[in-house]
Image (cartoon, rainbow, N blue to C red):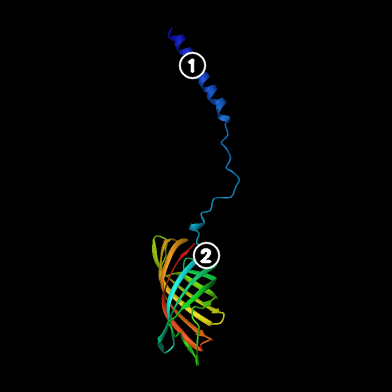
């Protein structure tokens, strides 16, 4: 009887072993032949865009009693070389508000409530790395030309809050323009807010 049980056990082991060998020919599915997923928000280089709004108090040089408010919206597109340097070009629409007398031009007075359409080049970047921070200081510098006004410069320092490629920006900006219509240098300070992606 013992011998029969041993023979039956060996036969069972042989059957299990043969069955296991039959199942070794299974093939795993192949990796799909498609492009790898890219999460563009985490890329350090590539295209970038920004939408900004700004408000300035502007003075004619040497004439603080002739102030006006300048408000505008800017659209910028460019290339991001890294988190510390971006280069872009922008267009804007600006609207001047003024006191009742405006800035004088000889015997006449300039009409305010005017709209300007500047084009400009912008450089910007982070001051420190945003890799492990939600908020970092940033800098930017605009230089361009506005039709019927002239050349202008506008440096900004501020803070960017969010992810490296999707963040809100807010900054203090200085504005200087050689106004051809007034034949004066105009300058002022303001606030700029926006969103960069």
| Residue indicated by mark 2 | 49
List the single residue furthest toward the right.
33
| Residue indicated by mark 1 | 10
List the single residue furthest toward the front.
100
The quarter of the image holding the N terminus is top left
Where disc 1 sits, the SS reads: helix
In the rendered structure, find residue 77 and report the number of the disc placed on it: none
Please report whichever mark, 1 or 2, sits nearer to the chain's N-terminal start.
1
Query: Which residue shows up at 52% across the image and 66% down it?
Result: 80
Q: Nearer the viewer, residue 65 or 156?
A: 65
Residue 143, above or below 5:
below
| Residue 183 position within the rendered picture, expressed as x and y whole percent measured from the top left | 51, 89
Q: Nearer the viewer, residue 33 or 70?
A: 70
| Residue 124 position within the rendered picture, expressed as x and y whole percent measured from the top left | 48, 71
Where disc 2 sits, the SS reads: strand
List the single residue furthest toward the bottom.
107
> Label 1 crowding class (10 Å Cα cut-off): few <14, some 14-19, many 20+?
few
Q: Nearer the viewer, residue 139 or 65?
A: 65
In the visual, does 69 lie left or right of 29?
left
| Residue 120 position within the rendered picture, expressed as x and y whole percent measured from the top left | 54, 75
Residue 32, above or below 23:
below
Residue 90, above or below 17:
below
Query: Which residue shows up at 54% across the image and 74% down it?
Result: 121
Query: Which residue shows up at 52% across the image and 67% down it?
Result: 81
């Amino acid at each position: 009887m013992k011998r029969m049980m041993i023979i039956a056990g060996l036969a069972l082991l042989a059957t299990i072993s043969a069955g296991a060998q039959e199942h070794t020919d299974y093939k795993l599915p192949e990796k799909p032949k498609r492009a790898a997923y890219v999460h563009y928000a985490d890329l350090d280089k590539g295209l970038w865009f920004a939408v900004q709004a700004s408000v300035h108090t502007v003075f004619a040089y040497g004439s603080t009693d002739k102030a006006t408010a300048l408000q505008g919206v800017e659209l910028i597109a460019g290339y991001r070389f890294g988190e510390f340097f971006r280069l872009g070009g922008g267009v804007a629409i600006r609207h001047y508000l003024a006191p009742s007398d405006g800035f004088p031009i000889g015997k006449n007075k300039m009409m305010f409530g005017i709209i300007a359409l500047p084009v400009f080049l912008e450089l910007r970047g982070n001051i420190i790395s945003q890799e492990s921070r939600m908020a970092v200081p940033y800098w930017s510098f605009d230089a361009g030309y506005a039709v019927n006004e002239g050349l202008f410069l506008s440096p900004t320092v501020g803070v960017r809050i969010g992810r490296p490629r999707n963040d809100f920006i807010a900054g203090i900006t200085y504005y200087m323009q050689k106004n051809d219509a007034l034949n004066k240098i105009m300058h002022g300070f303001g606030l700029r807010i926006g969103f960069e992606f």
